[in-house]
Image (tube, rainbow, N blue to C red):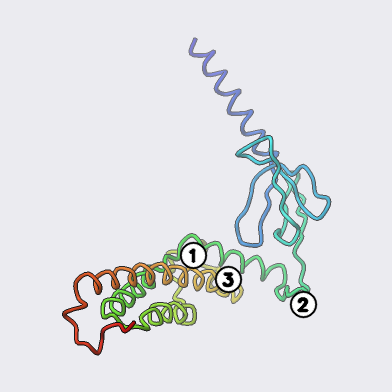
Amino acid sequence: MFKIIFSILLTVLLSLSSKAQHKDTILLMNGNFVVEKVIDTVIGAVTIINPANTKEKLHYEYDEIYCVKYASGFTDYYYTQDTLKGNYFTREEMQYYMYGERDARKGFKARGCLIGAGVVGLASGGLGIFFAPIFPYGYMGLSGITKVRIKHSTISNPNYIDYDAYILGYERVSRTKRRIQALIGGTIGLAVGYGLYFGVLKDKLPSTLTLRF
């Protein structure tokens, strides 16, 4: 009985392994990748079966794709350096740029911007200043300008940091995440601050700080 069960399990594992080996890899321009069998590459898109719903198809336009690595070993590149299209990087540079995007997307947290904008929003809203929203949202704007510190713990390969394209990709995603977190933190802080002001602090603060309607 044990031999029969073992034989069945081995057959299933070999079958799954065989299917995985025959899948292709689509490397997207945002640094993500999709491992699935390519069934079509015409009409300006690469088509696969949706792994979540086998009755549907997913289409990736050529502009979204860096390359497709087929199970046969052949690689089909869709990205080419073309300044007229805004593609200033070489293929190698673009690959490092995408690595930077991917690492920042996975490892960069931007918690400082979330907390900082929240504190600014809470303080300005809590004082009842008429132009209170300017402060947290101004903080959001500044958060996308300041230098990004790349933590080595978030880098998937230490050698990547030697490439300028990698740093640019990492910084682009990091600044976007900073703005988003600052927007969330500032909005929450501002709402809480206004709540405190109208609920508790309005009659206790000097009249020069109160809102005028």
Label 3 crowding class (10 Å Cα cut-off): few <14, some 14-19, many 20+? many
> Circle 1 sits in a helix, a strand or a loop, which is it?
loop
46 lies left or right of 4: right
Please report whichever mark, 2 or 1, sits nearer to the chain's N-terminal start.
2
* Quadrant position of residue 65: bottom right
Q: In which quarter of the image is the C terminus?
A: bottom left
Residue position for label 2? 83
> Circle 2 sits in a helix, a strand or a loop, which is it?
helix
Which of the labelled discs sits on residue 169, or is there none?
A: 3
Please report whichever mark, 3 or 1, sits nearer to the chain's N-terminal start.
1
Residue 198 percent location from the top left of the image: 25, 72
Q: Find the distance from the CA under tag 3 to the CA under tag 1.
A: 12 Å
Picture residue at 54% right of the left edge, 13% below the top? 4
Which of the labelled discs sits on residue 174, or is there none?
A: none
Picture residue at 71% right of the left edge, 44% below the top? 48
Q: Find the distance from the CA under tag 3 to the CA under tag 2.
A: 18 Å
Counting every numbered tag in the picture gives 3
Name the residue furthest front.
213
64 lies left or right of 111: right
Name the residue furthest left.
204
Q: Find the distance from the CA under tag 2 to the CA under tag 1.
A: 29 Å
User: Depth check: 96 or 55 in front?
Assistant: 55
Picture residue at 77% right of the left edge, 53% below the top? 45
Residue 127 percent location from the top left of the image: 26, 80
User: Depth check: 30 or 61 in front?
Assistant: 61
At label 2, the amino acid type is: Thr
Residue position for label 1? 155
At label 3, the amino acid type is: Gly
User: Depth check: 198 or 28 in front?
Assistant: 198
At label 1, the amino acid type is: Ile
